[in-house]
């Protein structure tokens, strides 16, 4: 028997033989692990597009074909006021990978299909109804815990801002597909590019993170930000799944962010289900922030991951890597981080999380001693933006504030040194991923307000969530060596490194020792020469 879901697959070769090409067999292992039950106390909303969404006329063909056996045990529903006129292949695929279940005979082989939300309550709402009933009215009769949208627009507009306000108002974890790369241009789609939404990109899971030459973020069909102010996606997820078509035949989707977003939303549902086992008063009103912080901070870094541009000049202002975001979603890592427990500011363990409220004149400090001599220290801070409650739902600047995240190294002498900071003026997520140094006895994370107006105002209060840990890095992780960002480590990178040595700007400091010189170039040369051994 071939088991293809539950985020595991036992035989990639057999799958390829059955279906003609790779369905990215490691996708499921990367996202998480097999679970014995589907979350039943979590509610998810899927906003569906109709086939002719661009015409402005709904044909109500936004639902899956629930007469198929794969949906026989699923808990899918939609508005009773709508009489669907047809089925959506797009939504059928999304519901397959989130809620499909059953055993099937395909080409003489048995397939056990076990999606992560096979018994979870999933409500499907047509796009125009979502706008009219929820966004315009700013009301949700039964607010979901998780919302997923697998389409968008290339510009921010009133409905994307109104949807952001719903996420803040009802503490909803919102996921949206970032776009499909060259097919849509490289611009991110809204609401994935919106601040309160988690923008999910698609990436190949095959051989991740052990890339020797190809760059994870260079997915064939996945957009990334071209706006220097906002770095998106937040992270990437597998986008290629085996799903049922409208006739009950198994097909692979192709690697698209339309399927990466609901996959990530499914992971959020599982985390929320696990979160119910934790009694921590500071979680109230912060569940969605905490889910975002956990998934962001535990994402697996791919080869050549680096904040912002290829040098270190924007490391403190660019939240993520331009193409990978925080990395590949890692549900197992997020579950482990959740199990580390909530911890209040003060002396904490080397891994954990916190959720609460911070006011302008206060700073939250988390002090710990690293247990490892090598590796990285990671921290992710998340909060929500506020929007006006009436059309066109512009940002509520009177309530909005900007936070920043600082990592201080504490020497044996007691001297405190600012090792790294993340302070983006246009994001409500801050992320640090910094190498552990033997120069420091301990470290201190500081969650503080960034803008002076908020610091001086005792009335400024923001719900936030913060997750941190020591992180190991794969032995063959290439770090910053792809300095020309072409997705390859080759002599083109060496040429650029050498040219910088003789320039007025000076050499690239790739090893964080405070200077750019030939020592920074040697690791890249060693990696390249391995190809000629």
Image (cartoon, helix red, strand yellow):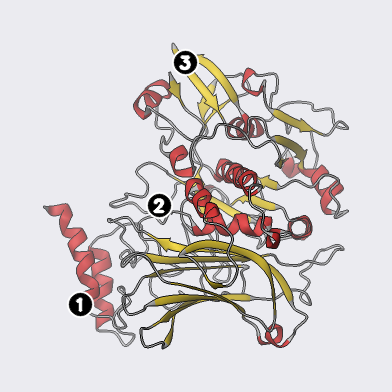
- Asked if residue 529 shows in the view, the reply is yes
Question: Residue 352 at x, y = what percent?
Answer: 52, 61
Distance between mark 3 and mark 1 Cα atoms: 57 Å
Residue toward you, 518 or 413: 413
Residue under pointer 3: 110
Mark earlier in primary sequence (1, 2): 2
Q: CA distance from mark 2 to mark 3?
A: 33 Å
Q: Residues within 10 Å of mark 3 (few under 14, many from 20)?
A: few
Q: Residue at x 17, y 53 (%)?
A: 531
Question: Given this view, does label 2 or label 3 mark the residue nearer the observer?
Answer: 3
Eyeballing the image, is 34 above or below 493? above
Residue identified by numbered label 1 = 518
Identify the secondary structure beneath mark 3.
strand
Cα–Cα span, label 1 and label 2: 27 Å
Badge number at residue 11: none
Pick the quarter of the image with the N terminus. top left
Residue 11, placed above or below residue 293: above
Callout 1–callout 2 Cβ contact below 8 Å: no
Q: Residue furthest left?
A: 533
Q: Nearer the viewer, residue 169 or 367?
A: 367
Q: Residue tagged by mark 2? A: 216
Judged by depth in the image, the label closer to the viewer, 3 or 1, is: 3
Q: Are the residues at dot 3 and dot 1 in contact (C-beta closer than 8 Å)? A: no
Q: Earlier in the sequence, mark 3 or mark 1?
A: 3
Q: Is residue 473 left or right of residue 309?
A: left
């Amino acid at each position: 028997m071939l088991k293809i879901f539950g985020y595991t697959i036992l035989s990639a070769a057999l799958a390829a033989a059955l279906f003609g090409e790779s369905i990215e067999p490691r996708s499921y292992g990367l996202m998480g692990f097999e679970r014995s039950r589907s979350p039943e106390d979590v509610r998810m909303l899927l906003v569906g597009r109709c086939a002719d969404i661009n015409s402005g006329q709904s044909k109500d063909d936004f639902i899956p074909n629930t007469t198929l056996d794969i949906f026989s045990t699923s808990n899918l529903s939609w508005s009773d006021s709508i009489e669907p006129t047809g089925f959506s292949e797009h939504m059928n695929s999304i519901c397959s990978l989130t809620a499909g279940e059953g055993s099937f005979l395909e080409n003489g082989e048995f397939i056990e299909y076990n999606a992560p939300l096979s018994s979870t309550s999933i409500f499907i709402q047509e796009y125009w109804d979502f706008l009219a009933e929820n966004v315009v009215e700013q009301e949700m009769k039964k607010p979901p815990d998780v919302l997923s949208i697998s389409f968008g627009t290339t510009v921010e507009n009133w409905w994307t801002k109104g949807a952001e306000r719903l996420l803040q108002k009802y503490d909803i974890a919102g996921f949206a597909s970032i776009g499909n790369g060259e097919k849509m241009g490289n611009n991110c789609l809204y609401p994935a590019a919106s601040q309160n939404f988690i923008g999910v990109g698609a990436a190949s899971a095959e051989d991740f993170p052990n890339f020797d030459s190809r760059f994870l973020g260079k997915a064939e069909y996945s957009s990334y930000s071209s706006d220097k102010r906002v770095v998106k996606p937040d992270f990437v997820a597998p986008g290629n799944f085996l799903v049922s078509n409208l006739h009950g035949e198994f097909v692979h989707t192709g690697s698209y962010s339309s399927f990466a977003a609901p996959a990530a939303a499914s992971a959020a549902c599982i985390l929320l289900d696990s979160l119910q086992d934790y009694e921590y008063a500071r979680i109230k009103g912060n569940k969605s922030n905490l889910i975002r912080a956990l998934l962001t901070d535990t994402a697996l870094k791919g080869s050549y991951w680096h904040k912002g541009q290829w040098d270190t000049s924007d490391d403190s202002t660019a939240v993520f890597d331009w193409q990978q975001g925080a990395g590949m979603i890692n549900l197992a890592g997020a579950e482990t981080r959740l199990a580390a427990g909530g911890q209040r500011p003060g002396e904490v363990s080397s891994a954990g999380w916190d959720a609460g409220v911070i006011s302008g004149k206060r700073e939250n400090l988390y002090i710990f001693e690293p247990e490892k001599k090598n590796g990285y220290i990671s921290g992710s801070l998340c909060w929500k933006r506020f929007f006006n409650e009436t059309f066109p739902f512009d940002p509520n600047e009177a309530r909005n504030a900007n936070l920043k995240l600082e990592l201080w190294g504490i020497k044996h002498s007691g001297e405190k040194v600012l090792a790294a900071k993340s302070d983006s003026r246009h994001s409500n997520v801050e992320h640090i991923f910094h190498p552990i140094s033997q120069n420091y006895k301990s470290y201190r994370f500081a969650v503080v307000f960034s803008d002076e107006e908020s610091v001086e105002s005792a009335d400024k209060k923001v719900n936030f969530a913060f997750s941190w840990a020591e992180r190991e890095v794969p032995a063959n992780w290439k770090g910053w060596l792809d300095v020309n960002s072409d997705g390859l480590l080759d002599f083109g990178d060496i040429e650029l490194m050498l040219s910088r040595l003789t320039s007025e700007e000076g050499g690239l400091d790739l090893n964080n020792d405070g200077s750019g010189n030939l020592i920074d170039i040697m690791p890249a040369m060693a990696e390249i020469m391995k190809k000629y051994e």
